[in-house]
Image (tube, helix red, strand yellow):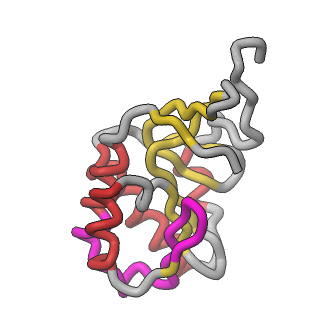
Amino acid sequence: MGDGRAANKTQPTDQPVEDFVAGVEPPRRQDEARRVVALLTEATGTAPVMWGTSIIGWGTYTYRYASGREGEWMKVGFSPRKAQLSFYGLQDTDSQRQVLDGLGPHTTGVGCVYVKRLEQVDEAVLSELARLGIARGDYDAAES
């Protein structure tokens, strides 16, 4: 891309979200995935889109590095991994970080919130985190 944007490896695709969710294993994780997709779709007010082969995303934003590199990424994302549910865009703003402790059992990584079982978290807090995430604008990012 000649405009200062470097393409991310993970890009939006045309794969139907429903097809992806129908193939999630084990069955318990598939049920959780269906519930999360419905919950995040309602919370964000936007339709889900597959990003790559295993991430479901809602909304997009542009990030910019001081070097001039720019890219686009989902505002809120989710991936039903075997070991845990991975959420993206739920801890990126001050308002989200203030709410995150109320979610229930979870761990965090760089840009991700991990949950082992959906029934252990407060779905109202999950919805609020998604609402706050979808409301974010573009931003300047730190290079890593």
Residues rendered magenta in the picture: 108-126
Q: Is residue 139 above or below residue 124?
A: above
Residue furthest toward the front?
Answer: 66
Which of 113 and 142 lies nearest the eye of the viewer?
A: 142
Q: Position of residue 76 (x, y in %)?
A: 45, 50
Say whether residue 39 is visible: no
At a point 25% along the width and 60% down the height, the residue shown is 128
Q: Position of residue 83 (x, y in %)?
A: 64, 81
Q: Is residue 32 above or below residue 119?
A: above
Q: Position of residue 45 (x, y in %)?
A: 28, 41
Q: Quarter-wise, where is residue 7 in the image?
A: top right
Q: Is residue 139 left or right of residue 21?
A: left
Q: Quarter-wise, where is residue 96 in the image?
A: bottom left
At a point 68% along the width and 37% down the height, the residue shown is 11
At a point 65% along the width and 62% down the height, the residue shown is 23
Q: Is residue 94 above or below residue 41?
A: below
Say whether residue 1 is visible: yes
User: How many numbered callouts?
Assistant: 0
At a point 64% along the width and 28% down the height, the residue shown is 70
Q: Is residue 36 left or right of residue 72?
A: left
Which of 21 and 39 lies nearest the eye of the viewer?
A: 39
Q: Position of residue 30 (x, y in %)?
A: 53, 71
Q: Is residue 75 above or below residue 69?
A: below
Q: Quarter-wise, where is residue 136 in the image?
A: top left
Magenta region includes residue 27: no
